[in-house]
Amino acid sequence: MTAVTVYGWRKSSHSGTHNCIEVGRIDDGAAVRDSKNPHEAALIFTRTDFAKFLANIKFGKFDN
């Protein structure tokens, strides 16, 4: 596995008490992690895939 450098983490403005995520910028995309477990693995997205991920969230693809 190749190491990825993350240039700062930002907590999502939509994070609540039990569902907090942070997003970090990487050279060619974004990293997403659980803010309650910052030392665990992060999801790594290319720019294109991160844009698709955000669009799916915006349009309710992951709502229960």
Image: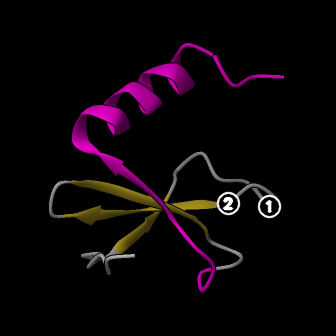
Residue that carries the numbered disc 1 in the rendered image? 17
Which residue is at the front of the view, 41 or 24?
A: 41
The disc label shown at residue 20, or none: 2
Residue at 51% x, 21% y: name it. Answer: 56
The disc label shown at residue 30, or none: none
Magenta residue span: 38-64
Marks 2/1 in contact by CB < 8 Å: the verdict is yes
Identity of the amino acid at label 1? Answer: Thr
| Category of crowding for the residue at label 2, using alpha-carbon neighbours closer than 10 angstroms: few (below 14), some (14–19), many (at least 20) | some
Of tags 2 and 1, which is closer to the observer?
2
Which residue is at the front of the view, 8 or 3?
A: 3
Q: Is residue 36 above or below residue 48?
A: below
Quadrant including the N terminus: bottom left
Residue at 23% x, 41% y: name it. Answer: 47
Q: Residue furthest bottom?
A: 39
Secondary structure at badge 2 equals loop
Quarter where residue 25 is shown: bottom left
Quarter where residue 34 is shown: bottom right
Which residue is at the front of the view, 56 or 28?
A: 28
Disc 2 and disc 1: Cα gap in Å? 7 Å
Give the side of residue 4 with respect to residue 15, left or right: left
Residue 60 percent across, percent down from the top left: 64, 16
**45 inside magenta stretch:** yes
Residue at 57% x, 73% y: name it. Answer: 41
Residue 44 percent across, percent down from the top left: 41, 57
